Amino acid sequence: MTTAPSPKDPAPPAVTPLLIATDVRTAFHTARGPVQAVDGVSLTLGEGETLGIVGESGSGKSVLGRTLMGLITDGPGTSVSGSVLLGGTDVHALTPAGRRALWGTEVAMVFQDPMTSLNPVKKVGTHLSESVRLHLGLSRAEARERAVGLLRQVGIPEPSRRADQYPHELSGGMRQRVVIAMALACGPRLLIADEPTTALDVTVQKQILDLLRSLSEELRMATVLISHDLSTVAGRTDRVAVMYAGRLVEYADTAAVFDRPRHPYSSALIASIPRLDLPPHTLLPAIEGSPPDLLHPPPGCRFAPRCGRATDRCVTQAPRLAGRAGDRDTGVVACHHPLGADEEATA
């Protein structure tokens, strides 16, 4: 008598990513020609996940963040292509009014400099109450109460008194907390933090980064953390996307990128991070040369002129991303000669 095979456990239901960006391209048209600031970037981000986007200044990180949010769209002087789906909604297919309705409730951004993000002639409470009255339909009294609660949530002491102060009356760290509170005011599902610790001292930087992480975990909010400093995203993100000259060169689990970087550029960035175990006055490795001019980018790998592993193939043929984005060990890398698992991070 043949025994029937035992039924297998049902597969877990597929989880639809909150953010799906496919082949995103953003160009600025200048008098000298088009500048391709973002060139074919594809990313996914699930609910509650944190993604770090890193790279040198000018690599396209901030432009990508603004494009994902829909702040940069097709228009005079700009060209945007590709698909950005947020919760199944095509951000760039919306009308301007549709995108404005999305901002604050579905996606919000923390900008680099809080002094330019805050209106100097408006009180802190007014900054916070305006958006909740517009998007949530709260009364003036209800909006005031929520504003004070948001200030308390981001760790600002005496929130009632601070709500009646102007931005210039607060410290830099408090102003950044106000900007974070503004971003959280309407309960967005995705938060994009663009260099949120710029111009803050080291102690305050840690406080702000820890605050963002705790809020993300508490609210199950997806977060994109943009930074030129890899140490900022270490230990605070689930995955890291490394950008260079507008392109994605490596995309993998955070631990994999730091422990086993596969792209020479990722390796060089990690090697340049100061380490406590090095003797005093030790010179850090530096990446020679400069990023390419995006008006006239090189035909092959854009990192080839600065890479010690470059060959003739690298100079003439642009590498494509290879690997599996879901592989926690290797991820994907765009390199003809990726680093092996036994090679340490060196500049």
Image (spheres, grey):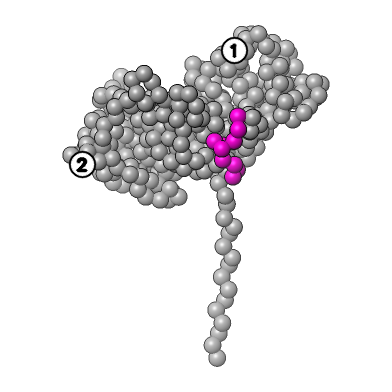
| Residue 64 shown left or right of residue 222 in the figure | left
Seen at 81% across and 24% down, the residue is 139
Seen at 51% across and 30% down, the residue is 73
Q: Quadrant of residue 242?
A: top left
The quadrant of the picture occupied by the C terminus is: top left
Foreground disc of the pair 2, 1: 2
Seen at 45% across and 26% down, the residue is 78
Q: Secondary structure at mark 2?
A: helix
Reply above or below: 17 against 131.
below
The quadrant of the picture occupied by the N terminus is: bottom right
The 10 Å Cα crowd at callout 2, few under 14, some 14 to 19, many 20 or more, is some
**Label 1 is placed on what type of residue?**
Ser
| Residue receiving disc 1 | 171
Q: Nearer the viewer, residue 182 or 217?
A: 182
Q: Which mark is residue 313?
A: 2
Reply above or below: 26 against 283.
below
The 10 Å Cα crowd at callout 1, few under 14, some 14 to 19, many 20 or more, is few
Q: Specify the segment rendered in magenta.
A: 87-96
| Residue 167 shown left or right of residue 266 in the figure | right
Q: Nearer the viewer, residue 126 or 231?
A: 126
